[in-house]
Amino acid sequence: MGAGSAVVVIGADGDPTTGLISQLHQLGYRPELVPWPASELHLRSLRPLAVLLDLRSLGVHATSAIHAVRRGRAARDAILIGVVPEDEAARIDLALGFDDLLLAPYRIGELAARLRLAHWRSETAASSDILRAGQLAVNPTTYQASINRRPVDLTLQEYRLLLFLLRNPDRVFSREELLAHVWGHDYFGGTRTVDVHVRRLRAKTEAAGELIETVRGVGYRLALPPSG
């Protein structure tokens, strides 16, 4: 699954990033190394399955690299995976917009699992019908969200969380259930990432009202506003 797909790796032109490139070749992907500082024009020309940011070699430039990826529309639609030293994982700011984290050192099987999940997410069949919650509209085919026809700029993982909640309105989900359904069973991050993404979604969709409700002691639900 995913063999031959392009995967962008942003990091330094040397170890440990070259080791990551070699592993991607072994798994049958087409890796493309984009040494930092990357050309934003170059990033915009790519349409990869995933973008791997090798924080082991990016160091203090990691935040700038993430923002550059998110500015480029083509790359922004890809799964964004951070390759992070395990002893630094607790200091990673989840609000930066990572869709997944790969803790190093890791086994090549873990890398393969992350990319299989990215491929599954990108190939998941989506209904062409527009989903609505009051003034909020989401097009599952084009991956676009809008409020009163004004675009809402979401990261891919924010979009997936919103889409899942829209497809299951008024149902309460625990944080663990949301992690399993939206991030996948292979995700090793904690439930805090759900809280972070919900907080960001609320901020970006507040013009449509308070759609995502907290059910104390349980989790979250998307409450459809009354029609009319």
Image: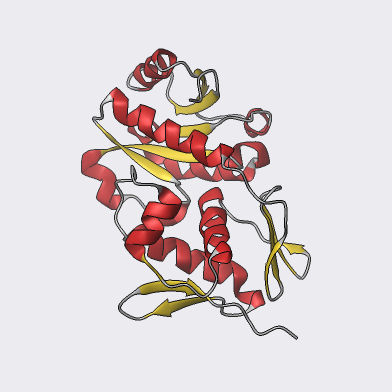
| Direction from residue 48 to residue 56 in the image, left or right | left
Give coordinates of residue 62: x percent, y percent: 43, 40
Q: Quadrant of residue 21?
A: top left
User: Which color scheme does this rendered protein use?
Assistant: secondary structure
Furthest toward the right, the residue is 149
11 or 45: nearer the eye?
Answer: 45
Total numbered badges shown on the rendered structure: 0
Q: Nearer the viewer, residue 198 or 63?
A: 198
Q: Residue 91: x, y in percent?
A: 29, 51
Q: Residue furthest left?
A: 87
- For residue 206, above or below residue 76: below
Residue 138 location (% of width, % of height): 68, 60
- Image point (44%, 37%), residue name: 117
Residue nearest the viewer, comparing 189 with 113:
113
Q: Position of residue 205 (x, y in %)?
A: 61, 70
Is residue 53 among what the camera can see? no
